[in-house]
């Protein structure tokens, strides 16, 4: 399956990576690797992670305090948010569409 980041999710990913890079470049690389590994698991086993709301699934990263929320849309994994776990938990809900 293909994986695509919604525009806002891509911005969230880029912001998090930049924040980690400012602390130490290796942290940014580790964050990127963990997100990549999670999206690869999603693409091979799209129903692996639990449903959180409607058809949106939640993948909690293990090394970083971030959660990837995604929906399976046909042959597409659509990443809706890359959210810090201490942020308002439902800020991303208005991104859900029933395409």
Image (tube, grey):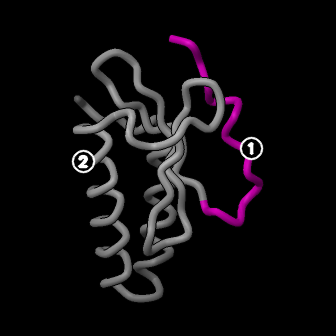
Q: Is residue 43 left or right of residue 10?
A: left
Q: CA distance from mark 1 to mark 2?
A: 25 Å
Give the image quarter of residue 14.
Answer: bottom left
Q: Percent position (x, y) of residue 49? A: 45, 43
Give the image quarter of residue 88.
Answer: bottom right
**Between 67 and 82, the one nearer to me in the picture:** 67
Q: Which residues are magenta?
A: 84-99
**Between 89 and 44, the one nearer to me in the picture:** 44
Query: The N terminus is located in which quarter?
Result: top left
| Mark 1 crowd level (few <14, some 14–19, many ≥20, 10 Å Cα) | few
Tell me, for residue 4, which label it has, or none.
none
Residues at badges 1 and 2 in contact (C-beta under 8 Å)?
no
**Between 14 and 2, the one nearer to me in the picture:** 2
Which residue is depicted at the point 64% across and 63% down?
85
Which residue is depicted at the point 62% across and 38% down?
52
State the residue position of label 2.
40
């Amino acid at each position: 399956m293909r994986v695509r980041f919604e525009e806002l999710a891509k911005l969230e990913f880029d912001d998090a990576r930049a924040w980690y890079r400012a602390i130490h470049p290796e942290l940014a690389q580790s964050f990127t690797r963990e997100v990549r590994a999670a999206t690869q698991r999603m693409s091979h086993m799209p129903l692996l992670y639990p449903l959180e709301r409607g058809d949106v699934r939640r993948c909690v990263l293990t090394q970083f305090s971030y959660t990837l929320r995604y929906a399976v849309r046909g042959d597409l994994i659509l990443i809706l948010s890359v959210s810090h776990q201490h942020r308002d938990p439902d800020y991303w809900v208005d991104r859900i569409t029933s395409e």
